[in-house]
Image (cartoon, rainbow, N blue to C red):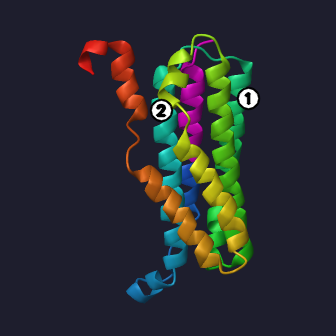
Amino acid sequence: MRKGRLEAFSDGVLAIIITIMVLEMKIPESGELTDLKKLWPVFLSYILSFVNVGLYWNNHHHLFQLVQKVDGKVLWANTHLLFWLSLLPFATGWMGENHFTLWPVILYGIVLTMAGAAYFILVLCLKALPGNEKVAIAIGTDTKGKVSVVIYLLAIPLAFVHPWIALALYFVVVSIWIIPDRRIEKKIVLLQDPDEA
C-alpha cells in the first residue's frame, strides 16, 4: 500500500485537533486586560497541548520520510495514535478550565501516556514490515520515546502528591522533545547518499 493517504489523513486530523483546541478558548466578555488574567490556566494548557501536537506531527512527518510500505496493521496503529491525540482537546479544556486540579491533570497524563505508547506501537509495526528497514536503523532503541512514557507514568501517581508536580513533568517531556531530534534527518542523508555524511 502507498503511504500518501495515511500521511494526508494524519495531517488533516492533527490540524483539526489544533483547531478544536483554539476554538475551545472562550473570548473574554469585556475588553479589559484583567479579563485575560483569568484565562491564564486555559492558555497555559493550550500551549502545552499545541506543542505536544506539533511534536507528534513533526516526528510523524520525519518518520514517514523513511517509510516505503504500509499495511493494514500500520493503518490501524496510526489510527490508534490519532485516537489518543484526538482526546487532547477535551483533556486540555478540562485541565485549563479547572485550574490544574487533580483529576483533569491525571486524565491529561493518561492521554499523553497512551499517545506515547501508541506512537511506539506504530514504530514497531513499521519496523516489522519488509521494505522499512531504514526505519529500524534510524529509530534505533528509541530511548527518548521510552523515557517519555516512563516520565508520564511517574507523573500520574505524583499528581496525588500535587498536580503541579505532574504538570512540571509533562513540561519536562516537552523540553526533551523540543530540542530537534536529528536521528532521522542524519539517517536520511546517510541512507540516501553515504558520501554526504
Labels 1 and 2: the sequence-earlier one: 2
> Which residue shows up at 41% across the image and 41% down it?
181
| Quarter location, residue 78 | top right
Q: What residue would you read off at disc 2?
A: 61
Looking at this view, is 176 or 4 the one in front?
176
Where 94 sits versus 5, above or below? Answer: below
Location of the N terminus by quadrant is top right
Q: Give the left or right position of residue 180, taking residue 39 as reference.
A: left
> Residue 183: x and y, percent?
41, 33
Q: How many marks?
A: 2
Where 192 sits versus 124, above or below? Answer: above
Decide: few, some or many residues near mark 2? Use Cα within 10 Å; few <14, some 14-19, many ≥20. some
Which residues make up the magenta segment?
A: 1-16
> Which residue shows up at 53% across the image and 23% down it?
135
Element carrying mark 1: helix
Where 162 sits versus 134, above or below? Answer: below
> Residue 99: x and y, percent?
61, 80
Location of the C terminus by quadrant is top left
Element carrying mark 2: helix
Residue extending furthest toward the left: 196
> Residue 130: x and y, percent?
63, 11
Q: Magenta segment: does it hold 45?
A: no
Q: What residue would you read off at disc 1?
A: 76
> Which residue shows up at 58% across the image and 54% down it?
20
> Residue 187: x and y, percent?
40, 24
Q: Amino acid at mark 1?
A: Trp
* Label 1 – label 2 distance at C-alpha: 17 Å
Q: Amino acid at mark 2?
A: His
Decide: few, some or many residues near mark 1? Use Cα within 10 Å; few <14, some 14-19, many ≥20. few
